[in-house]
Amino acid sequence: MMAVIQRVSGASVTIERKVKGEINTGFMVLLGITHADTQEDIEWLGKKIVGLRVFNDDEGKMNLDLKTVNGDILLISQFTLHASTKKGNRPSFIEAAKPDIAIPLYEQMIHFLGNELGKAIQTGEFGADMKVALLNDGPVTIVIDSKNRI
């Protein structure tokens, strides 16, 4: 499971010209799920996301986590994070989980993050054509792969 986490001062996702999810201060997270991901990946990655200390304290140092700043999460499923570009110029998505595996894991991540953060998680819609807008704050962008824990 892979996440691209962007610290934002605002983010939204629009589907068919209607805003589906929207946040102010917090994280816009792109989540890529593989066929090998499990509940253990959800828990490890979810705790990392919520615990990431990348918000500025009173001295301007990245030292505060999402809960401390009362931030939100906008979680967007994105199978293209697992693109392989080793051969040719057309990416292969063979490592990305098929919907029958990915949708339940995505929904479990939404639930897990909501429990960890203590509030509802804003989302896109799995498999939809989404328009994502964000104002990256910093910019701060962190990539975490649950298969690369060492």
Image (spheres, grey):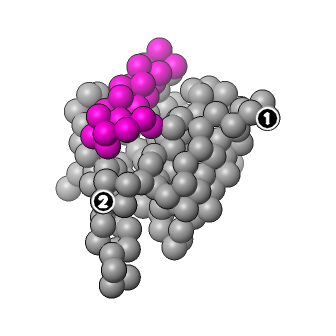
Residue at horizontal 40 percent and vertical 32 percent from the top: 110
> Circle 2 is placed at which residue position?
68
Residue at horizontal 26 percent and vertical 46 percent from the top: 47
Whether the magenta-drawn stretch holds residue 100 is answered as: yes
Which secondary structure, mark 2?
loop
The Cα atoms of the two marked residues, 1 and 2, are separated by 33 Å
Q: Quadrant of residue 121?
A: top left
Which secondary structure, mark 1?
loop
Seen as rendered, the residue at the extreme bottom is: 59
On screen, residue 82 versus residue 68, left or right, reads right
On the image, the x and y values in percent for residue 58 come to 33, 80
On screen, residue 47 versus residue 88, left or right, reads left
Q: Amino acid at mark 1?
A: Arg
On the image, the x and y values in percent for residue 130 come to 69, 36
Task: State whether the magenta stretch is mostly helix, strand or loop.
Answer: helix
> Circle 1 is placed at which residue position?
17
The stretch of residues the image draws in magenta is 99-121
Q: Amino acid at mark 2?
A: Thr
On screen, residue 150 versus residue 95, left or right, reads left
Q: Quadrant of residue 51?
A: bottom left
User: Which quadrant would the N terminus be assigned to in this image?
Assistant: top left
